[in-house]
């Protein structure tokens, strides 16, 4: 089976596949090589062209960036290996079937809707990334770091055109998308490495100390940004994919793994995409910041543009434009496809093609607003903060449920469609820590882990209280 078919099978079966409501049989299990290719392709993508430069806008230092990313990404890999892959290979259920057994169908429906919308917003950011490259031949005005609304009619036309193409292709099915992505992924990785090398040459780097001094002790953040320390970088990079690992979304992927050790394959995508690519993109922006145009903006107290298209074009020419378009496209397409599958779980009578078109339309509208891309660090932190605590329900039931004396898969065994223990555990943990974040201006990634832990603990407490009152069928 080709890598494209493997990815199509895994993604489709997250929501409506052959094994949607049963364990994956032994005959369908896959080796670690399948997951290596999938994760390597998924995490070297369009977002990386934005995230790397955004780190520089926060005034991060060399130590905080390089070591913070190294350790934060290690924690993400460990989370995938010892939580997601461990539970995924134990039960071999999709996330949604697993949640259905614990939460009940009504709560899972709400989760699917929220998940689908967040996927759309993420895809919208990737459409924005591609638009910054497509707009170069048209001399399009690029969105500024502080922009929220569309800045020109040209921008609107380019985004709508890209969104329409991506949505139509995604609606034709994931097999075509996956095949294209597998061919494009090596090109994108080469482009990131090339951008890094060209940037090092332009920055006159001849030694490791020269490289380190690019960031040095850091600087003041740009207008509208907050200052990042080691803990900001460490926790943000750990929880950039919080919904996937501690949020358990990738149970749907690892249920196909023969062994939990397949979780180590996430390191391929993380350290290529979330380490090498982020740093390479940051180097691109470091070159741009030395240009007369950027220095003039800084001198006037402004924030230079973070436009991936022009940054890559300045380093690699036309190849840079192609790389940015491909990176945005290969990320947006599967993300829209996932969003469509999530929506189809909510409205099952609508065909996959049409729900994908709906998801693509929402993503395109989101792409019109540069804020989703320009504030990507904040959005990704919010995305993980919202969805990660749901994963704590599964983790705490698996590791501590029997010790506490609660019934596993309670909704299934009791016949309820709405498990209040799950709802109140999530609502209280989300509400408490979101209030702390807003009231005391605490960065969301700082409270993601406490919210996750509190949600798991409250779930055990509420389940212990509630399950005494209901007789299991």
Image (cartoon, grey):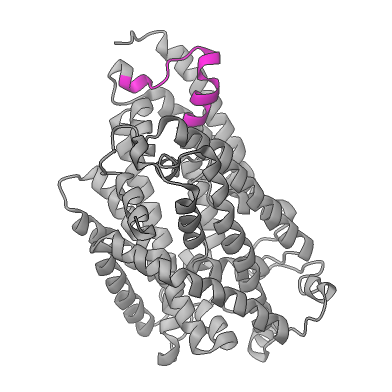
Question: Does residue 435 show up?
Answer: no
Residue name at image x 51 percent, y 20 percent: 460
Q: Position of residue 444 (x, y in %)?
A: 59, 48
Position of residue 23 relative to residue 163, above or below, is above
Quadrant where the C terminus lies? top left
Q: Position of residue 85 (x, y in %)?
A: 51, 39
Position of residue 121 relative to residue 450, above or below, is below
Q: Which residues are magenta?
A: 393-412
Q: How many marks?
A: 0
Position of residue 124 relative to residue 304, above or below, is above
Q: Quadrant of residue 282?
A: bottom right
Task: Report the side of 32 relative to 195 (left or right).
Answer: left
Residue name at image x 36 percent, y 59 percent: 2
Residue name at image x 47 percent, y 51 percent: 35
Near-viewer residue (80 or 225): 80
Magenta segment's dominant SS is helix
Question: Does residue 401 show up?
Answer: yes
Near-viewer residue (159 or 14): 14
Task: Report the side of 230 relative to 383 (left or right).
Answer: right
Position of residue 435 relative to residue 35, above or below, is above
Task: Report the side of 332 relative to 187 (left or right).
Answer: left
Q: Is residue 395 magenta?
A: yes
Quadrant where the N terminus lies? bottom left
Q: Is residue 324 magenta?
A: no
Q: Position of residue 446 (x, y in %)?
A: 64, 45
Q: Quadrant of residue 210?
A: bottom right
Residue name at image x 50 percent, y 25 percent: 398
């Amino acid at each position: 089976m080709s890598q494209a078919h493997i990815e199509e099978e895994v993604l489709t079966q997250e929501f409506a596949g052959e094994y949607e409501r049963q364990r994956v049989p032994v005959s369908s299990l896959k080796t670690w090589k399948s997951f290596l290719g999938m994760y390597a392709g998924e995490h070297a993508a369009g977002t990386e062209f934005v995230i790397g430069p955004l780190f520089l806008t926060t005034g991060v230092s060399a130590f905080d960036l390089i070591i913070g990313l190294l350790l934060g990404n290690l924690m993400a890999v460990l989370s995938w290996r010892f939580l997601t892959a461990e539970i995924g290979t134990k039960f071999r259920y999709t996330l949604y079937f697993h949640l259905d057994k614990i939460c009940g169908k009504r709560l899972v429906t709400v989760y699917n809707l929220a998940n689908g919308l967040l996927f759309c917003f993420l895809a919208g950011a990737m459409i924005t990334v591609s638009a910054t490259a497509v707009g170069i031949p048209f001399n399009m005005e690029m969105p500024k770091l502080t922009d929220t609304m569309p800045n020109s009619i040209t921008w609107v036309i380019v985004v709508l055109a890209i969104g329409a193409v991506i949505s139509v292709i995604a609606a034709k099915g994931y097999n075509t998308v996956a095949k294209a992505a597998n061919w494009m992924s090596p090109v994108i990785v080469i482009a990131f490495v090339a951008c890094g090398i060209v940037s090092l040459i332009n920055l006159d780097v001849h030694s490791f100390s020269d490289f380190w001094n690019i960031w040095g002790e850091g600087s003041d953040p740009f207008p509208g940004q907050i200052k990042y320390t080691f803990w900001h970088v460490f926790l943000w990079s750990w929880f950039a994919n919080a919904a996937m690992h501690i949020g358990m979304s990738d149970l749907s992927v690892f249920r196909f793994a023969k062994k939990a050790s397949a979780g180590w394959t996430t390191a391929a995508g993380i350290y290529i995409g979330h380490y090498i690519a982020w740093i390479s993109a940051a180097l691109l922006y470091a070159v741009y910041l030395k240009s007369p145009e950027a220095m003039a903006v800084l001198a006037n107290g402004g924030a230079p543009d973070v436009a991936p298209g022009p940054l890559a074009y300045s380093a690699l020419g036309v190849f840079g434009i192609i790389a940015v378009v491909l990176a945005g496209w290969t990320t947006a397409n599967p993300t829209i496809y996932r969003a469509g599958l999530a929506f189809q779980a909510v409205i099952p009578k609508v065909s996959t093609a049409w729900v994908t078109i709906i998801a693509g339309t929402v993503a395109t509208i989101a792409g019109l607003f540069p804020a989703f891309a320009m504030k990507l660090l904040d959005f990704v932190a919010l995305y993980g903060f919202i969805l990660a605590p749901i994963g704590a329900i599964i983790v705490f039931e698996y590791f501590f449920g029997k010790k506490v004396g609660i019934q596993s898969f309670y909704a299934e065994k009791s016949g309820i469609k709405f498990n209040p223990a799950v709802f109140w555990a999530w609502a209280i943990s989300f509400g408490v820590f979101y209030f702390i974040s807003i009231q005391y201006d605490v960065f969301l990634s700082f409270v993601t882990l406490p919210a996750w832990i509190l949600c798991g603990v409250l779930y055990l407490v509420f389940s212990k209280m509630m399950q005494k009152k209901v007789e299991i069928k």
